[in-house]
Image (cartoon, rainbow, N blue to C red):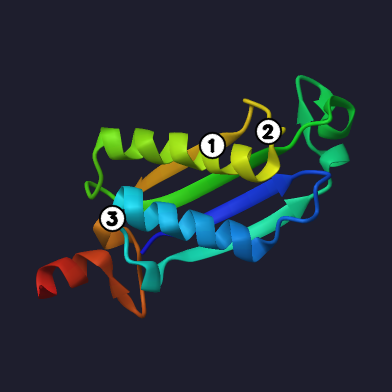
């Protein structure tokens, strides 16, 4: 598992949700060691005139921005893996869009294993059952 929530504000409408989901799933697998089969990605696009950095809209700035949240099970990744994920997500969006503002965010949430799960079973249950 992880669960990724993504918001993107860009005038460039040629990048698809599928491209975003594919790239983020690959990074979750390659950098964080997550299982692609249970990675969920929720992508939402926002009008750049409704996204502000320093009080100016992205339309005024002629920039793209994004916010990526990923929920992962606590204690399953190191600081270095998390730092690499943040960097590679930013680099991926910069490659896709080209005009990404540095004021774009990636947030990793460590969730206690007994506090979340999927398919009706917590991550704690899965760990113990192994």
- In this rendering, position of residue 123 left or right of residue 54: left
Q: Which mark is residue 100?
A: 2
- In this rendering, position of residue 96 left or right of residue 64: left
Q: Nearer the viewer, residue 104 or 93?
A: 93
Evaluate whether residue 107 shows in this view: yes
- Label 3 element class: loop
- The x, y position of residue 127, in whole percent, is 15, 66
- The residue at the point 80 percent across, 54 percent down is 13
Q: CA distance from mark 3 to mark 1?
A: 18 Å
Q: Earlier in the sequence, mark 1 or mark 2?
A: 1
Q: Earlier in the sequence, mark 3 or mark 1?
A: 3
- In this rendering, position of residue 81 left or right of residue 7: left
- The residue at the point 89 percent across, 27 percent down is 60
- Label 1 element class: helix
- The residue at the point 27 percent across, 34 percent down is 79
Marker count (numbered) = 3
- The residue at the point 87 percent across, 34 percent down is 59
Q: CA distance from mark 1 to mark 2?
A: 8 Å
Q: Which mark is residue 33?
A: 3
Q: CA distance from mark 2 to mark 3?
A: 26 Å
Q: Residue furthest bottom?
A: 119
- In the rendered image, the quadrant that contains the C terminus is bottom left
- In the rendered image, the quadrant that contains the N terminus is bottom left
Q: Which mark is residue 90?
A: 1
């Amino acid at each position: 598992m992880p669960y990724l929530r993504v918001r993107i504000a860009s005038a460039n409408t040629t990048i698809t949700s599928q491209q975003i989901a594919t790239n983020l799933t690959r990074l979750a697998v390659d950098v964080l060691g997550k299982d692609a089969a249970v990675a969920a990605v929720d992508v939402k696009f926002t009008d750049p005139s409704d996204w502000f950095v320093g009080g100016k809209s992205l339309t005024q700035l002629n920039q793209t921005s994004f916010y990526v949240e990923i929920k992962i099970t606590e204690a399953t990744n190191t600081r270095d893996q998390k730092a690499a994920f943040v960097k590679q997500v930013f680099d991926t969006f910069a490659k896709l869009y080209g005009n990404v503002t540095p004021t774009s965010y990636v947030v990793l949430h460590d969730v206690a294993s007994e506090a979340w799960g999927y398919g009706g079973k917590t991550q704690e249950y899965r760990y113990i059952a192994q």
